[in-house]
Amino acid sequence: MGRGYIAEDAVEGYLSKLCEPGVVPVTGLLIGQSSAQRDFVVMATRTPQMDESTAAAGSSLDKDWVTEHARQVSRMLPGGLCVLGVFIITDTDAKDTLNSLRQLVFAVENLISGDRLWSPVDDDVTDRITLHVNPKTRKTVCRTFDVRDPKSTAKPADWKYQSGVCSSWTMVSCCLDVDMLLALPEDRTSTESMEKCLMEGLKAWAHQIEDGVCLIDGKKLPDDKELTAGQRRNVKQTLTAQLLITPCEQRLTEAVQQCGGSVSVRGAIHSRAYLHSNKPKASLAEKLLKRDVVSTVAVRVQMLLEELTAEEESKGDSKDRQRTDQFGLPRRLFCPVRGAAGPVCVCDYQFSDEGLSEVRDRLKEMLDMETAEEDLDTRQEMAAAESTESNEYTAEPTVQTVVEPKRNNYTGVAMASAVALLATAASLLYLQDY
């Protein structure tokens, strides 16, 4: 017998609706959390429909379209949640779709993993699921592939539904102050070189996060400590964590490099991770929380870079003149998973010029979720901003760009971070070096 998958009852209801005549064939993503013994599926979401002209020109299973959807969805998943695999609802026999699903699940994993800045560890589960649903008989065929092995073949897996899958999951959250300096390339005309340079700097910071000390409810717990020991069944548990980050020990002389400018990322982020109820250990909470910290910062930097690139292309801005601009990083907010009785939420990022209606539209498009504005939790980073109006960090996140391309700039990339329980939403600042 292969791996076991326990899916929330709401997933069954959602897939059943997609089996209606005139809807199939449908592809989509399965979202949840892995553990050593079994995986938990808390939600499913269909691939957004392509416009008629594009759909007519392509196949019913467009790999690029599905993988890009998976990349966007992965940005909206807090710590502990990930894309576990893909599903397809079609009249075509399961054997005839297996090869296409295999290619799809590997393509999804390759694209998502390419954006990750954290380092994988040996106990990471690398099996990914493909689920075939017959819309007439509702029969499901579940197979897994080890995406770590390019030659992996399909293995059978057990799929069953259960109510309250995440009703007693534990949530671990923290607020981390971020203060880092990233170098910019001398050639800023290339978006690829800009992104590569920023990601390299973020990777160095990510290693600091991975090496940090995690305190849970003020204590450094042994790695094998069970977080739910003594907890009553079906009772939600919320824990508060702190990450203590050691300043970079790299010597300044080794860290000096020639560059075309620098980026200072400062402020504070709200981070959280969800843990399954199958005897989760302190080591799992620390791993998932640290990964969420790294991911939420990287996602915001990537989103802002995409916005700035699009804006410069539309305006035809010249990069050979000195200019100063200010921008704001998007604020993170949360929305409960539909049909889940537990604390599990997905997230989105709201730019300062966006309203909640635009957030609702994205949740509908990416996750097929109908959401009321009152369901959106906007308090986490807004409260942090209000609490720091009197300290040294600005309460409103800003991005200031100062460019002077004719001058050779040098920057030291040694960075230091400190813990702050209450601070502003993360902000990005482009600075000219002294």
Image (cartoon, rainbow, N blue to C red):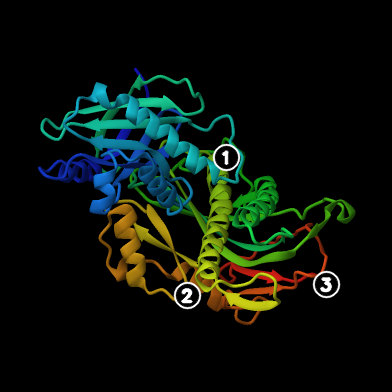
**Res 92 visible:** yes
Circles 2 and 1, Cβ within 8 Å, touching? The answer is: no
> How far, Cα to Cα, is label 3 from label 2?
30 Å
Question: Label 1 belongs to which residue?
Answer: 283
Quarter of the image where the C terminus is located: bottom right
Which residue is at a point 46% across and 53% down the rendered structure image? 75
Give above or below for 47 relative to 135.
below
Q: Earlier in the sequence, mark 3 or mark 2?
A: 2
* Numbered disc 2: secondary structure: loop
Name the residue nearer the viewer: 83 or 212: 83
In-image side of 345 versus 163 (left or right): right
Circles 3 and 2, Cβ within 8 Å, touching? The answer is: no
Nearer mark to the viewer, of 3 and 2 = 3
Q: Earlier in the sequence, mark 3 or mark 1?
A: 1
Give the x, y percent position of residue 313. Answer: 53, 67
Question: Label 2 belongs to which residue?
Answer: 352
Name the residue nearer the viewer: 341 or 323: 323
Circles 3 and 1, Cβ within 8 Å, touching? The answer is: no
Question: Label 3 belongs to which residue?
Answer: 434
